[in-house]
Image: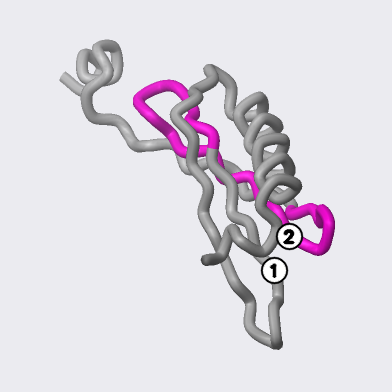
Amino acid sequence: MSFLKKLFGGGGSAKTPPSMPSETHNGFTITAAPVNDGGTWRIGARIEKEIDGEVKSHFMMRADTLQSFDDAAKASVDKARMLVDQQGDRIFT
């Protein structure tokens, strides 16, 4: 029975995405964190910055989905960089 569940998408364990290295962009730390969305990967990233001794964090998620985790991770970092460039510290307000 488990063979049929796996064949037709039922059951089975959800894959845990690999942990991604962080990168720094304009003083912000960006970590790609694509979200599994039923066989595709939704663009997502964690953006952090230390402000006045406190680490502020924002999780960005977009509606865009991609088939490959690696492609989604790259797109996630690209979108996060763009958000940092456009909004700067306002991301945290």
Q: Work out which residue is located at the far bottom of the displayed protein and give it.
A: 53
Q: Is disc 1 surrounded by few (<14), some (14 to 19) or many (20+) residues within 10 Å?
A: some
Of 54 and 73, which appears nearest the observer?
54
Marks 1/2: CA–CA distance: 6 Å
Could you say which quadrant of the image residue 5 lies in? top left
Residue at 54%, 20% (x, y): give it: 66
Q: Which residue is mark 2?
A: 29
Magenta residues (range): 22-43
SS category of the residue bearing label 2: strand
Of 71 and 29, which appears nearest the observer?
29
- In-image side of 63 versus 5 (left or right): right
Q: Tell me the quarter of the image containing the N terminus.
A: top left
Please state the horizontal and vertical placement of residue 78, each as a whole percent of the image. Answer: 72, 35
Q: Is disc 2 surrounded by few (<14), some (14 to 19) or many (20+) residues within 10 Å?
A: some
Give the residue type at disc 2: Thr
Please state the horizontal and vertical placement of residue 13, each as a whole percent of the image. Answer: 34, 36
Q: Which residue is mark 1?
A: 49
Of 73 and 89, which appears nearest the observer?
89
Of helix, strand and loop, which mostly describes the magenta segment?
strand
